[in-house]
Image (spheres, rainbow, N blue to C red):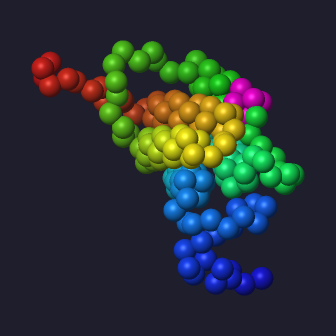
């Protein structure tokens, strides 16, 4: 199979179900940002997270392909695809709760950073938030599953907790944000 099809040379692409749309369509922007997030998570993995982190990240990467397919398939299409549901959301919530058991309570905002794994997880969190905004923009114009938005919102929370967890496991101290008036 050739990697290039020349089908997108005029600035259009196909959604699942065959509908042609412009490459800057909100739906394409949303799943493109999910793809970017998945790539950032690949970078996190390349920095060798903890065994727990690696297991979680591998699972998230698999699920992000489902998120992308869900976004690429209009809800009114009868295509048989997997869609993100409440069980995937609950899984993220359970992981957040489990990781937080190992962390000191937050007393202030913290600055993104730390180890290579931790800082890249903070970067992944910001890309995830951008994906969330893209999904909201898409949802304002086209039907999108509520579960997608909830999943991505919860995922950004998990990525924040994972950044803290990975830094804590590595013995990296978090840097608190100090408001200008208190320096």
Q: Quadrant of the C terminus?
A: top left
Residue at x-position 56% and y-position 33%: 153
Question: Does 32 sit above or below residue 163?
Answer: below
Asked where in the image residue 3 lies, by quadrant, the reply is bottom right
Question: Does 6 sit above or below residue 26?
Answer: below
Residue 6 appears left or right of 173:
right
Residue at x-position 85% and y-position 51%: 78
Query: Residue 30 placed where, x, y %?
Result: 56, 51
Res. 7 visible in picture: yes
Query: Residue 23 placed where, x, y %?
Result: 55, 66
Res. 60 visible in picture: no
Query: Residue 96 placed where, x, y %?
Result: 60, 26
Question: Does 163 sit above or below residue 78?
Answer: above
Query: Residue 110 placed where, x, y %?
Result: 34, 28
Front residue (pair 165, 33): 33
Residue 92 appears left or right of 105:
right
Front residue (pair 158, 142): 142
**Residue 112 included in the magenta stretch of the image:** no
Residue 16 appears left or right of 149:
right
Magenta part of the chain: 86-91
Residue at x-position 58% and y-position 18%: 101
Front residue (pair 129, 112): 129
Residue at x-position 56% and y-position 79%: 10
Asked where in the image residue 113 lies, by quadrant, the reply is top left
Residue 151 appears left or right of 46:
right
Q: Quadrant of the N terminus?
A: bottom right
**Residue 88 included in the magenta stretch of the image:** yes
């Amino acid at each position: 199979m050739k990697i290039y099809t020349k089908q997108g040379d005029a600035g259009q692409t196909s959604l699942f179900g065959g509908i042609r749309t412009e490459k800057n369509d909100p739906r394409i922007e949303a799943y493109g940002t999910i793809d970017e997030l998945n790539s950032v998570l690949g970078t996190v993995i390349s920095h060798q997270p903890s065994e727990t982190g690696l297991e979680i990240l591998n699972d998230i990467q698999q699920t992000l392909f489902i998120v992308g397919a869900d976004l690429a398939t209009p809800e009114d299409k009868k295509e048989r695809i997997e869609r993100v549901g409440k069980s995937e959301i609950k899984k993220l919530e359970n992981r957040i709760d489990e990781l937080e058991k190992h962390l000191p309570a937050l007393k202030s905002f913290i600055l993104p950073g730390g180890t290579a794994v931790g800082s890249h997880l903070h970067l992944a969190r910001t890309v995830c938030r951008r994906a969330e905004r893209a999904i909201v923009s898409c949802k304002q114009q086209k039907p999108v599953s509520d579960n997608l938005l909830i999943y991505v919102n919860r995922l950004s929370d998990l990525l924040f907790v994972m950044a803290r967890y990975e830094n804590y496991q590595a013995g990296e101290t978090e840097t608190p944000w100090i408001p200008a008036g208190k320096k």
